[in-house]
Each structure stands twice: as structure tokens, then as C-alpha cells.
Amino acid sequence: MGLIGLVLMILDPFKIVRNYVFKPVATLGLAAAEEYRARKEKSVTTTKNVFLKLLVVVLVGFSVVWASIFLYLYFYYSYMPSVLHVKDVHLNIRECKDNAYDCKPYPTANVAMTNHQRFLMVGQPYKIVLNLEMPESEHNGMFTVCGTVKDYGHVEVARSCRMSMLHYKSDLLKTILTFVFAPLLVFGYREEKQLVTVELFSNFLDDSTHPATNIDITIHCRDIQLYSAQLQVVANFTGLRYLMFNWPVLSALIGITTNLFFILIVCVLSWYHWDDTEWISDIRDRYQQIVKGVSKVAAMEQTKAVNPLKDTDTPSKDWLLDEE
């Protein structure tokens, strides 16, 4: 330091360069450096705040969108029933004991309409159809199919009978079709059979007091021939269910957008409510007032407990003074 001071004294004995050149330049440089550092810290803080706000907005938006999708899916699966239920029908000849007069040996079957739980929704109309796969035989003529819907207690809920038959084909048409499809018939790619559809119920409504659990199928024809039988329960959608089933993408967009709109309204109102801190200040002030009031009462009670005769001593002394 002595050598540096000596050099400065020789070069600038009157401190002109130091006071009017070096010092202003140094002050200006330090001020610029300080301002740059403050701006840098401010920009870093601003960047952090912007990044945090952006992250919060992205997380909230992601949560809101998925909440809207989840609500729509929950509504869809709770509101929309299954469209089609298919049950195999295993027909057997009814056994008549002791030649009962009210018993006829017709093909019958009992089909369960439950699968560990009810699959018919209350208030939803259904179409119940019986599909019969029958050979084109001369024995198969006109026949009647009856269906009886029963509940858990085997009480009859609904009954319907429908008449049906094979589609008629003349001998000439049969001969022509046989010659045309002979290769397919020979190799087993085609069979001489028809699928007969019998609509038992066109608009069946399940009752909540007597829910349908079984349906008895009876074919009133002894000589009927068939390969297999299937029972189909098809839901007849109307109104909102019809729109949701036939236009699923459009319904999903409308439903998710509606849920998103209401959830965003709730989020915005909640944000403004929690952002307003006046109610927190009011609660804090009331709490302080209550604490001060309790502390004053406790202090007064403590004072009375320490000096219980303070109030009674004063009138006694005044009485003694009066007596004197």
C-alpha cells in the first residue's frame, strides 16, 4: 500500500485525476453493475414466477379436462344400458305326467334374463326377439311361439304369442337354387335352411316392483324341426339415449365441453374467493379481539383471587375515619 500511495502521489500530487476521473468512472461503473445485477435478479424472479404460474395453469387445466372426461364417462356408463343381450335357447320336449289334460308335449325352454345382476333397466323399452334356425323341410309349417316373462317368485309379468312360418319357395325355385348353389352345398359352405325371426315383445318395460328374471319359451307345434334358437333383447333407445348411441362422438364433445364449462366457472369463482384476503384479515382481527377479551377477563379474575378483601377494606377504613 505504501508503494502504491507513493506512486499515486508522484503521478497525481493534487488528486485531480483521482477525484475527477477515476472516482466518477468507478462510481458510474459500480452503479451500472449494481443496476445490471438488480435487473438480472428481477428477471430471474420474474421468470420463476412466470414458470410457476404456467406450471400451475397447465396442471389445473390438465386436471379440469380429465375431470370433465371422467364425469362424462361415468354419466355415460350409468345412464346408457347395454344395447344387445343374446341368450342361447335350449328347447326340450315338455314331459307330461299321468296324461294331464292341460299338458301338451310342446318344445319349451326357460331362459334366465339375469347375469349375476339385472341387465334390464327400469323405464327403458326393450324388443325381445326369438331367432330360429330351421331347415327347409316339409315338416316345418306354420307354428306359434309364446313367451312368458316371470319375476323372482315365478309370477307372470307379461305374456305374448306370435305366429310364424318359413318363407315360401316353390318347387321350381328350389330346383333352380339347388343347381346354382350345388358346389357350395356339396362342400358345406351353404345349407338349406332359413333364419326365422319372431318378435315376441315390441316395447317391453321392466317393472321395479316385479323385475323380470326369466322368460319361458313355448313353441306350439309338435313336429317342428330346428337347428338352434337364440333369444335377443334389444334396447329401443329414444331421446337422449338415442342421440348418445347414434352420435357418440358429437355427444361426447358436447358433454365434455359442458362439464368443462361448469368446472371452469367453479374454479374461477374459487380462485377469486381465495385470492381476496380481506376475509382472512377479518377473521384474524376477530380472533385477536376474542383473545384480548379472554385475557382481560382472566386478568380480572386473577386480580380478584389475589386480593379478595380489597373492595371490603376501603369502606371499613372510611367508617373508622368517620368514627374518629
Image (cartoon, rainbow, N blue to C red):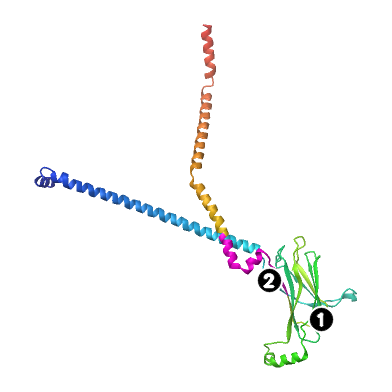
Residue furthest toward the top? 324
Q: Which residues are magenta?
A: 231-257
Total numbered badges shown on the rendered structure: 2
Q: Which residue is mark 1?
A: 142
Q: Quadrant of residue 66?
A: bottom right
Q: Secondary structure at mark 1?
A: loop
Point 29% across, 49% down: residue:
35
Q: Which percent across, then down, holds residue 229?
A: 74, 78
Residue closer to the observer: 243 or 72 = 243
Q: Which residue is mark 2?
A: 84
Q: Which percent across, then down, holds residue 213?
A: 75, 66
Q: Secondary structure at mark 2?
A: strand
Dot 1 amino acid type: Met
Point 16% across, 45% down: residue:
20
Using residue 86 as the reference point, say whether residue 138 is left or right of it.
right
Point 50% across, 58% down: residue:
61
Q: Quadrant of residue 159?
A: bottom right
